[in-house]
Image (cartoon, rainbow, N blue to C red):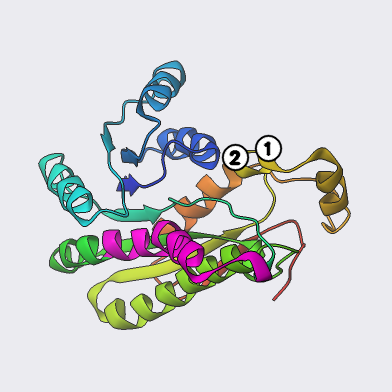
């Protein structure tokens, strides 16, 4: 059993993976920026006992407070950097300020959390950093240049971490998931969803609970590091 800190725990993807990790015997510490009440209600209905800390991961002092809380709650073995937002804008409408905002949420939140978690994991001599990315980082569609860039940075960051801590019993990997029946998918217009579905060889959207099982696989795979695992129904093949 591992103790997992999951960021972005109030989102739809997290709601799909939390029951899976709970059923597999992991204990969880959860953080969300603004959906605490809804998350508490979800956990109660699902029979999951997991403490929640409200934090804005773009604010350094919030991240420091988060990791003080983590220490008070028994520390962690695994950090899942799941916090992120969707974004759509044609490249000629995307200015540097908006790109910076997107990176603060989708990329630098993971940097802030990882930089706090890694000293703890190094001291333990074991641990996992797992970043959550997207098929869009590899196969962008119209209007996703900013989102694709932020997720691509996240994947490169994981590979760099993997090199830096490979001799410390720590692995760092990324899960790049495709279009799942959860979370941000419901923000996409129906007509566009049908068009997207035609690009997926499986011919359907995925079951987001598979992401939870992929997290469990990485937790139990000490020789898997620096990798991006693609869970996308064949939509993109490396």
**What's drawn in magenta, residue-wise?**
92-114
Residue at 57%, 51% (x, y): give it.
Answer: 86
In the rendering, which numbered label is found on residue 186? 1
Magenta stretch: includes residue 106: yes
Q: Would residue 50 appear left or right of 94 to someone viewing this image? A: left
| Residue 173 rendering spot, x and y as whole percentages | 45, 68
Q: Is residue 127 above or below residue 35?
A: below
Query: Which residue is rendered at x = 39% and y = 69% of the image?
Result: 172
Mark sitting on residue 8: none
Any magenta on residue 12?
no
- Residue 168 visible, this angle: yes
Quadrant in the picture for residue 53: top left
Dot 2 crowding, Cα within 10 Å, few <14, some 14–19, many 20+: some
Dot 1 lies on which element?
helix
Q: Quadrant of residue 115?
A: bottom left
- On screen, residue 112 versus residue 195, left or right, reads left
Quadrant for the N terminus in the image: top left
Q: CA distance from mark 2 to mark 1?
A: 6 Å
Residue 167 position, x and y percent, is 26, 81
Categorize mark 1 by other alpha carbons within 10 Å: few (<14), some (14-19), many (20+).
few
Contact check, label 2 and label 1, Cβ < 8 Å: yes
Number of the label disc, if any, that sits on residue 183? 2
Could you tell me if residue 2 is visible in this image? no
Q: Secondary structure at mark 2?
A: helix
């Amino acid at each position: 059993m591992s103790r997992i800190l999951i960021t972005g725990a109030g989102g739809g993807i997290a709601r799909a993976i939390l029951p899976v990790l709970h059923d597999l015997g992991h204990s969880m510490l959860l953080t969300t920026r603004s959906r605490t009440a809804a998350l508490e209600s979800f956990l109660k209905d699902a029979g999951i006992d997991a403490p929640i800390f409200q934090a804005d991961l773009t604010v350094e002092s919030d991240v420091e407070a988060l990791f003080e809380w983590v220490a008070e709650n028994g520390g962690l073995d695994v950090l899942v950097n799941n916090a992120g937002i969707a974004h759509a804008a044609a490249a000629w409408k995307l200015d540097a300020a908006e790109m910076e905002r997107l990176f603060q949420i989708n990329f630098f939140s993971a940097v802030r959390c990882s930089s706090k978690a890694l000293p703890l994991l190094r001291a333990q001599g074991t641990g996992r950093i797992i970043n959550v990315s997207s098929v869009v980082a590899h196969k962008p569609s119209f209007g996703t240049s900013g989102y694709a860039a932020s997720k691509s940075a996240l994947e490169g960051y994981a590979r760099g971490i993997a090199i830096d801590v490979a001799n410390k019993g720590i692995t760092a990997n990324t899960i790049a998931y495709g279009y799942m029946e959860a979370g941000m998918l419901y923000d996409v217009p129906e007509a566009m969803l049908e068009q997207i579905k035609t690009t997926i060889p499986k011919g359907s959207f995925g079951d987001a609970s598979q992401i939870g099982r992929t997290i469990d696989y990485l937790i139990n795979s000490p020789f898997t590091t620096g990798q991006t695992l693609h869970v996308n129904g064949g939509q993109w093949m490396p």
